[in-house]
Amino acid sequence: MKKILIKGGKVVFGEEVLTQDILIEGEKIVAVGDLPGIQAQKEYNAEGLLVLPGAIDTHVHFNDEFMNTKSVHDYETGTIAAAFGGVTSVVDFSNQIPKKPLLHTLEKKKQEAEGKALVDWGVHPVITDARPEILDEIPLLVEKGAPTIKCYMVYREEGLMIEEEDLKRIMKNLKTAKGMLLVHAEDNHIIEKNISSMIKKGLTEPIYHARSRPPEAENKAIKKIVRLAEHTQAKVFIVHMSTAKGVQLVRKAREKGTDIKAETCIHYLYFTESQLEQEDGIKWICSPPLRSFFHQKKLWEGLRHGDISLVTTDDAAFSWDAKLIGAQRFDKCPNGIPGIEVRLPLMYSEGVQKGRISLNQMVELISTNPAELFGMAPQKGTLAPGADADIVFFDPEKKWTMGLHNLHMNTDWSAYEDIEVTGKVEKVFSRGELIVDGEQFLGKKGRGRYIKRMLK
């Protein structure tokens, strides 16, 4: 097998940052440390650079059909952008197909990824119809490596919402099958009532998207899911949490022994709801919505103290024409922000550089924890010998201005425009293969593999 030697980089490994070498054989890391006298076919000098485990994004939406439009990231364009952002593994959501077995959600994604995916990928099936025969398929999905199943507590009119009694049954089935429920926690009743009231009053600008989905709507749903988690003893994971109270509710539930964890997203950590008051405010319409600086501050604190386990992107990339559908009515705008590429540089620049989190915490939040919580460890998320050689060279001193002109996402607009950033991805290896080298993409279409996941 081909040997590759990475020399002299600052290797982030567990709780340490040490100048070390890494030896790769074939697709695997075989040694980390001071490695003199090693003969390798290829050698890379990483002096002055951080050497990180490949980032993992467990919250992306490829080929996503929502609000009468379709996202512009597929398994080719989405995984190229991911790779340029230092992401070597993604987990995509796949909605239940009406009148089809739940297993089709997995088969559909395999068809979409085949011949296109450039990094490794997994699937979260989404249940939107909790008929008994659908729930009977949960053990089969777990067995096939898709043990994390998502449900919505909102979007009744869009046909996505799952009611409380069905949530209980799904959670019980997941507990038995050794799976985990992912939940979009917002209270549908509050939101529907607010949207109707605001539209009647002519309050249709983007800022009213946030006003219609206040923190209370999210907090009420989180309280309910905490109660259900306590009742069923199932594993639960709250996606895209955005409120200060949510951080507190999750912390208190975990202190009581409830198996519940949560993520937040990079857009909640960088933007506030003031973006929605701009002329092009539709760029930042997402759900849950952006919050005030107070909530943002509490999210950063939650990351630092371990109350929030992950930072993801919730990449939902819609075209500008699609976003313009909601230019006059916030409730018609496809919800979502393209962000699959920006997470690592912004987490370093806004988090590590500004002292909000440590470098090792950043790696935990975007690599180690996703791998461990979502059933990819020890194969992914670490630079330990035996792991896949998913490795990122990151220049911690590089200053650059982020924008549409130098990002690689397949969109004709950017929410992350003219942002001054410190820290940039320089090289990316996926299973020992160099796929990003500066501005060059070297990977071949279809090289990405399905990750068969199993929860601990």
Image: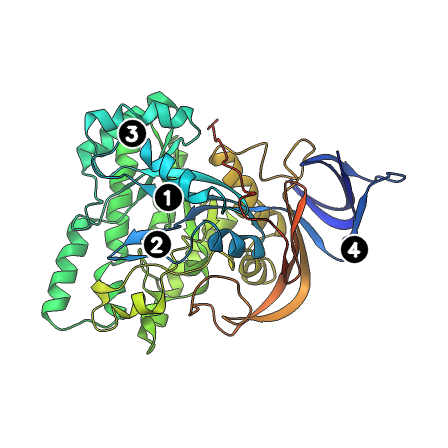
Q: Which numbered disc, 1 or 4, marks the residue closer to the eye? A: 1
SS class of the residue under badge 3? helix
Q: Residues within 10 Å of mark 2 (few under 14, many from 20)?
A: many
Q: Is residue 149 visible?
A: no
Q: Which residue is mark 2?
A: 243
Q: Give the Cα distance between marks 2 and 3.
A: 24 Å
Between 84 and 99, which is closer to the camera in this rendering? 99
Q: Give the Cα distance between marks 4 and 3.
A: 48 Å
Q: Give the Cα distance between marks 2 and 1.
A: 23 Å
Q: Earlier in the sequence, mark 2 or mark 1?
A: 1
- Disc marking residue 231: none
Give residue 69's position: percent from left, percent from top.
28, 58
- The way the protein has been coloured in the rendering is rainbow
Quadrant of residue 150 in the image?
top left
Between 113 and 64, which is closer to the camera in this rendering? 113
- Disc marking residue 47: 4
Callout 1 amino acid: Phe
> Which residue extends farthest left?
200
> Which residue extends farthest bottom?
279
Callout 2 amino acid: Thr
Asked if the residues shown at circle 4 and circle 2 are in contact, with their CB atoms under 8 angstroms apart, the answer is no
Callout 4 amino acid: Glu
- Disc marking residue 171: 3
Residue at image coords 28%, 49%: 219
Residue at image coords 36%, 56%: 71
Q: Residues within 10 Å of mark 4 (few under 14, many from 20)?
A: some
